[in-house]
Image (spheres, rainbow, N blue to C red):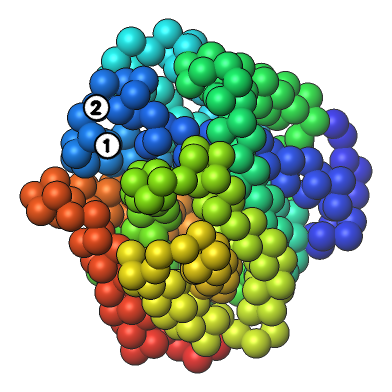
Amino acid sequence: MHTTIRQLGIRPNRVQIGLQLIQIFLVGLTIGMTRVVIPALAESDFGLAAQSFFLLTSFVVVFGAVKAVMNLFAGQWSERFGRKTVLVAGWLVALPIPFLLWWAPSWNWIIAATVLLGLNQGLSWSMALNSKLDLAQSNQKGLINGLNEFSGYAAVALAGVVTAVVVDALGARLGLAVFSAVVIGLGLLLALFTVVETLPWAALHHSQANVEEASAEPQTLMQLFAFASLRNKPLIALNQAGLVEKFTDALVWIFLPVFFLQQGMSLVQAGSVIAIYGVTWGALQLVTGPLSDTWGRKGLLFWGMSICGLGVLAIPFSHSVWLWSVEAAVIGIGMAMVYPNLGAAVGDVAPVSYRASLIGIYRFWRDSGYAVGALLMGLLAQWTQNMMLPFLFVGLAMLLSAVWLQLWLPKR
């Protein structure tokens, strides 16, 4: 596709931004299909013992580790090879997933599919987001992140409910295989034939940036990693918050379906309550993302982490579907305040020349939270055989992380 005049902004680039949002929606469907079905059916379809909490968490540990590493390198690869090339590569590596799920005779096949899922997420989601940031103006980062996360996590919630229904009709392997084949095939075709390369728009941002700011930072990936992880206090605070908030999502992914089933809920009922969390999280980001562009990020981040932590702490002490539904919505509200604005805040701090790499480093730490959180929760639950401890651990971690943000993040 040939573009004669390139402009920054959502309005002049609304078609391409819309196509990139469809990419995010499809990536969200791909990950959402595992949210309710796999934890709930781990015992009945894949032979895990009822109290094998550590084995249950293994697929999320692997997913988080793979996705985190991909996030680290995807930004730099996209600056060298182009956003579209990395986006397409993310869909190509996902092509075997439906076949692995269909033929899976053991839990190890699910782990293998999860490795490919992490590769897809780290490459395709990252690139669809970076492309939209390239196309938008610098003062639209909050809105872009809000649109991005709304599209992705609305899809995660929708996929959780749809796959629960499909699996109820077709069985776990066939249901997941059919759903994933349709989604992955559509994502690849649209990536190949509808999206454009956005590096020229990134060059426009660079040409408008302060030259001294852009040249002051280190240039190698290792230098940038050390800068963001050890030397720059705002980036350190944002990176640790990203890591900890993924503890909440890992808890919802792994333990909430099992917890609800233990309380006597059906798979579809559990998926519906968990979907409240995803829909609330996704929809409210349309408000919280652009709101942070005018109100600032810090207050939304502190209160979002705090609200989320309190919602998590309340779940094991409640005993009705109505209360769990309210608490799922509360956690979704907190995540909506946090999720788009952590990434936008990193974009605020990052020099334009290295924004993709620094966002990639943030996403490395953020998605490492899946692996770290799932591992710690699995060890706690396996050691004590107590389902309450993961909820207490995650809730307290969120509250402490909120305090860290409050102390180290600038006001604006």
**31 relative to 44, above or below:** below
Q: Is residue 214 visible?
A: no
- Image x and y of residue 264, in percent: 41, 46
Residue visible at 60% across and 21% down? 169
Task: Give the residue pinned by disc 2.
Answer: 48
* Residue wearing tag 1: 56
**Residue at coordinates 52% horizontally, 52% vertically from top-left?**
274
Secondary structure type for disc 2: loop
Q: Against 228, is 47 above or below?
A: above
* Label 2 packing within 10 angstroms: few (<14), some (14-19), many (20+): some
Please state, as top left, top right, bottom left or bottom right, where the N terminus lies in the image. Answer: top right
**Nearest the camera: 401 or 195?**
401
Q: Residue 233 is drawn in which quadrant? A: bottom left
The residue under label 2 is which amino acid type?
A: Leu
- Mark 2 against mark 1, which lies toward the viewer? 2
Query: Residue at horizontal 89%, vertical 56%?
Result: 12
* Residue 262 visible here: yes
> Nearer the N terminus, badge 2 or badge 1?
2
